Image (tube, grey):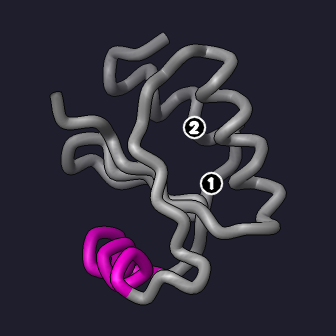
């Protein structure tokens, strides 16, 4: 099963909130920490066109530089409640 990818940075409060939210909702994602990981950072930039985290790639649908308030409607559009 291909999991959606969540790109995060260490020490990012929005990233921490998003990770906590996804864990509470039991929404499974593959998390990649882009801090000090040049390959993961480059992948995130190629997919999203920017370098801010968190960034999510939900099977080709991209949500970049967001918080939980933006994540909730994005997930609903993907059929996840």
Residue nearest the viewer, comparing 5 with 76: 5
How busy is the neighbourhood of tag 1: few (under 14 within 10 Å), some, or many (20 plus)? some
Residue nearest the viewer, comparing 27 with 73: 27
From the viewer's perspective, is residue 66 above or below residue 77? Answer: below
Q: Secondary structure at mark 2?
A: helix
First of labels 2, 1 by sequence position: 1
Helix, strand or loop for the magenta stretch, by majority: helix
Would you name the residue on which mark 2 appears? Answer: 71
From the viewer's perspective, is residue 22 above or below residue 45? Answer: above
Judge whether residue 64 can be spotted in this image. no
For residue 14, which numbered disc appears in the image?
none
Res 68 → quadrant: top right
Residue depicted at x 67% and y 41% = 18
From the viewer's perspective, is residue 50 above or below residue 30? Answer: below
Left or right: 3 with respect to 21? left
From the viewer's perspective, is residue 37 above or below residue 80? Answer: below
On whether residue 40 falls in the magenta region, the answer is: yes
Q: Which residue of the protein is positioned furthest toward the front in this rendering? A: 36
Residue depicted at x 34% and y 83% = 39
Q: Secondary structure at mark 1?
A: loop
- What's the magenta region? 39-50
Q: Which residue of the protein is positioned furthest toward the top in this rendering? A: 81
Res 45 → quadrant: bottom left
Judge whether residue 46 can be spotted in this image. yes
Would you name the residue on which mark 1 appears? Answer: 66
Query: In the rendered view of the protein, which quadrant contains the N terminus?
Result: top left
- Residue 72 percent location from the top left of the image: 58, 28
Residue depicted at x 37% and y 49% = 5
- Residue 67 percent location from the top left of the image: 69, 48
Q: Which residue of the protein is positioned furthest toward the left in this rendering? A: 1
CB contact under 8 Å: marks 2 and 1: yes
- Residue 60 percent location from the top left of the image: 20, 50
């Amino acid at each position: 099963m291909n999991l959606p990818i969540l790109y995060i940075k260490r020490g990012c409060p929005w990233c921490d909130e998003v990770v906590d939210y996804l864990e509470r909702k039991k929404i499974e994602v593959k998390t990649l920490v882009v801090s000090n990981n040049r390959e993961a950072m480059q992948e995130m930039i190629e997919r999203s066109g920017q370098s801010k985290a968190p960034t999510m790639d939900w099977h080709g649908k991209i949500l970049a530089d967001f918080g939980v308030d933006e994540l909730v409607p994005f997930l609903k559009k993907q059929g996840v409640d």
